[in-house]
Image (cartoon, rainbow, N blue to C red):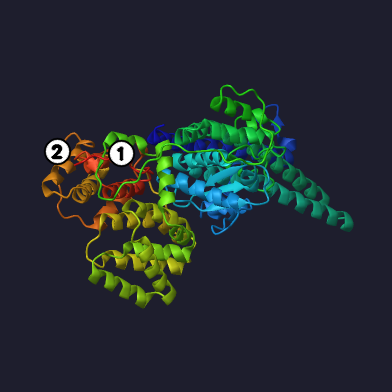
């Protein structure tokens, strides 16, 4: 499936949601005006000569008040959800998984999530377990890959084998990759805003009830006013829930088709429809099915892997397709009989695995294949990720799973091989970090010595999740330290730059209040200068021979502009300019990103091969554009 087309589709769904939101608010405003007219002006509501009662001033007042209430409700919920997936997971009762747990099912979950993340080219997301949920369900939440989380219920761990769990997690990763999560959070905010009208109604209802009670006791004339406000409160509740009813229809229409798409993407990912179909069959055979007991399950129902709440009008209100229909697509021979719940059995997953190669080996590669792999990992990538996890020492895995160890891992990976530079870097750490950090870094250096070059970036991807748990002050010191370690030799290597971009993209926003919403760029001409800068940098970094660089640069420019060969390769590009260019290019629309990614790949693989270090750089650059790219796998070729 085409990643860029799916991103465009996600953008269109967001635009459609905005249109529906405007229509819903307009309908609510008109309904509120009618309710006020019926309650307070019923004797004037109709005249045989003048017709229906119309008061422009009252109507405008009602419209503005409705906009204010709905807008404030939406804004408050948006601010509550600003931190992304973590807020949703905790709201549903999730607890961050203890990565040092000896629970076999938890270890299996962590292994599957890390495997899927490495295979898809995304950082390993934090994992939350909903311990009190015994139904089988899961979700992915966040605005982007930088703040995404994966949540699973205890029922999911207790009732699914590894093959089935892998199918569920692959389904959730497709939501992360395809851009569905941002829309899900916006839907939650919209529903909260519309429901705020009903909340106002409840407040009026309680106020009117208390007022009527006092009026009866004091025998005043306030009874009539209380009755009017009582009627208004009931009317607002009705109007609010009618709005919610239609909002749910919108949510259902948007969500159901995406579930089919996520199922298909998961099968493309794992090449194993049996696992995903098996998980759905287990759900059908479980008494609790996929039901969620959280009080917030209704407003988050569109996040879930399977339907988490019951619906009175299941055919039109459900956020998910019928289980039978989903299984039939995956297993055309499905008889309609669900699995009976049995003890979990580990399904064999042996198969051909992609062998790891040394860091200096040159791999045959072409730009078209790289472009097709963006957002579309396959079984080979899963096997490759499995090999990576098997080859990373357990001490390194344990360190990457907790914040303190993750920091020392990054420091160790950045220590230079040159003895003098190495000594300067260690002196800095000794002076500006505590003794434990310094000694642990020294220990990690020895453990990492025999680790293959191609395992470095995956180690960073695993560590990203733990680094999110640093305090703001700790993260600030961490950033200062890695900047010093990178620049200690006055030269930034390909790996160092890849690590630098990954940290900035996936961690900076978690420790900053900077608004990540930027205006989309729809014209390639507008970003020509940034493309020029980026491709010059890639030509310089990706080709050791000076004579190859201008040709590689022009190969990339010609993928973007018909007169690309008229541009001159820039020999001196600072990292600051490259960072600025990437920040601008990240805002272009998906159809232009496709061309930029293809140009980057064409530039790097101009000589028809790519080293692991060059692949790391390309993946970091493409990831900065918001396009997750799986590990580049190719057959070794003698050069």
In the picture, the quarter occupied by the N terminus is top left
Query: Of residues 324 and 358, which is closer to you in this image?
Result: 358
Mark 1 in CB contact with mark 2 (< 8 angstroms): no
Residue 624 appears in the picture as rendered: yes
Q: Residue at x 49, y 49 (%)?
A: 148
Which label was assigned to residue 464? none
Which label was assigned to residue 565? 2
Query: Of residues 367 and 177, which is closer to you in this image?
Result: 367
Q: Residue 283, position in %: x, y?
A: 65, 36
Query: Would residue 595 be found to the left or right of residue 438 on screen?
Result: left
In the picture, the quarter occupied by the C terminus is top left
Q: Which residue does the numbered mark 1 point to in the structure image?
A: 634
Against 18, is 442 above or below?
below
* SS at circle 1: loop
Query: Would residue 255 be found to the left or right of residue 202 on screen?
Result: left
Query: Of residues 459 and 428, which is closer to you in this image?
Result: 459
Residue 78 appears in the picture as rendered: no
Q: Residue 310, position in %: x, y?
A: 69, 37
* SS at circle 2: helix
Q: Residue at x 63, y 41 (%)?
A: 344
Against 87, is 281 above or below?
above
Q: Residue 600, position in %: x, y?
A: 26, 42
């Amino acid at each position: 499936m085409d990643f860029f087309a799916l991103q465009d589709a996600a953008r269109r769904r967001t635009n459609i949601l905005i249109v529906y939101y405007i229509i819903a608010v307009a309908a609510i405003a008109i309904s509120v005006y009618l309710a006020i007219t019926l309650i307070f002006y019923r004797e004037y509501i109709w005249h045989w000569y003048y017709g229906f009662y119309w008061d422009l001033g009252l109507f405008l007042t009602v419209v503005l008040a409705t906009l204010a209430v709905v807008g404030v409700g939406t804004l408050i919920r948006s601010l509550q959800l600003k931190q992304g997936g973590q807020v949703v997971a905790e709201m549903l009762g999730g607890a961050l998984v203890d990565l040092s747990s000896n629970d076999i099912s938890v270890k299996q979950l962590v292994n599957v999530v890390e495997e899927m993340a490495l295979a898809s080219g995304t950082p390993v997301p934090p994992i939350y377990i909903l311990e009190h949920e015994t139904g089988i369900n899961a979700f992915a939440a966040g605005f982007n890959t930088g703040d995404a989380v994966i949540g699973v219920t205890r029922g999911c761990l207790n009732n699914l084998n590894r093959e089935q769990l892998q199918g569920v997690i692959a389904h959730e990763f497709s939501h992360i990759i395809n851009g569905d999560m941002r829309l899900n959070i916006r839907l939650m905010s919209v529903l909260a805003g519309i429901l705020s009208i009903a909340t106002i109604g409840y407040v009026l209802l309680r106020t009117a009830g208390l007022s009527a009670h006092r009026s009866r006791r004091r025998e005043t004339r306030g009874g009539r006013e209380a009755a009017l406000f009582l009627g208004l409160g009931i009317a607002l509740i009705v109007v609010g829930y009618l709005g919610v009813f239609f909002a749910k229809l919108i949510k259902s229409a948007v969500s159901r088709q995406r579930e089919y798409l996520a199922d298909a993407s998961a099968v493309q990912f794992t090449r194993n429809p049996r696992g995903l179909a098996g998980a759905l069959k287990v759900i059908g055979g479980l008494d609790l099915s996929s039901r969620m007991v959280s009080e917030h399950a209704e407003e988050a129902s569109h996040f879930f892997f399977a339907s988490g709440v019951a619906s009175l009008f299941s055919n039109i209100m459900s956020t998910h397709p019928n289980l039978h229909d989903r299984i039939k697509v995956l297993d055309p021979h499905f008889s309609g009989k669900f699995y009976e719940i049995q003890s979990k059995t580990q399904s064999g997953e042996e198969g051909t695995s992609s062998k790891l190669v040394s860091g200096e080996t040159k791999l045959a590669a072409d730009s078209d294949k790289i472009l097709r792999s963006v957002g579309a990992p396959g079984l080979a990538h899963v096997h490759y990720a499995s090999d990576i996890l098997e080859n990373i020492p357990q001490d390194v895995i344990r360190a990457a799973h907790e914040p303190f160890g993750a920091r020392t891992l990054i420091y160790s990976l950045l220590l230079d091989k040159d003895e003098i530079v190495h000594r300067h870097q260690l002196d800095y750490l000794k002076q500006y970090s505590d003794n434990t950090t310094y000694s642990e870094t020294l220990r990690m250096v020895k453990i990492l010595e025999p680790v293959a070059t191609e395992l470095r970036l995956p180690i960073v991807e695993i560590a990203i999740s733990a680094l999110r748990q640093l305090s703001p002050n700790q993260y600030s010191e961490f950033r200062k330290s890695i900047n010093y370690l990178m620049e200690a030799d006055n030269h930034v290597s390909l790996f160092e730059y890849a690590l630098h971009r990954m940290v900035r993209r996936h961690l900076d926003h978690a420790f900053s209040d900077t608004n990540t919403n930027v205006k989309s760029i729809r014209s390639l001409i507008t970003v020509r200068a940034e493309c020029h800068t980026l491709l010059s940098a890639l030509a310089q970094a990706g080709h050791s021979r000076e004579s190859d660089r201008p040709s590689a640069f022009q190969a990339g420019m010609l993928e973007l502009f018909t007169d690309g060969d008229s541009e001159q390769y820039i020999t001196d590009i600072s990292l600051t300019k490259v960072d600025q260019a990437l920040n601008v290019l990240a805002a272009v629309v998906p159809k232009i990103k496709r061309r930029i990614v293809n140009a980057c790949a064409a530039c790097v693989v101009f000589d028809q091969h790519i080293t692991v270090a060059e692949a790391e750089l390309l993946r970091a650059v493409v990831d900065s554009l918001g396009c997750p790219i799986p590990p580049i796998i190719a057959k070794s070729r003698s050069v």
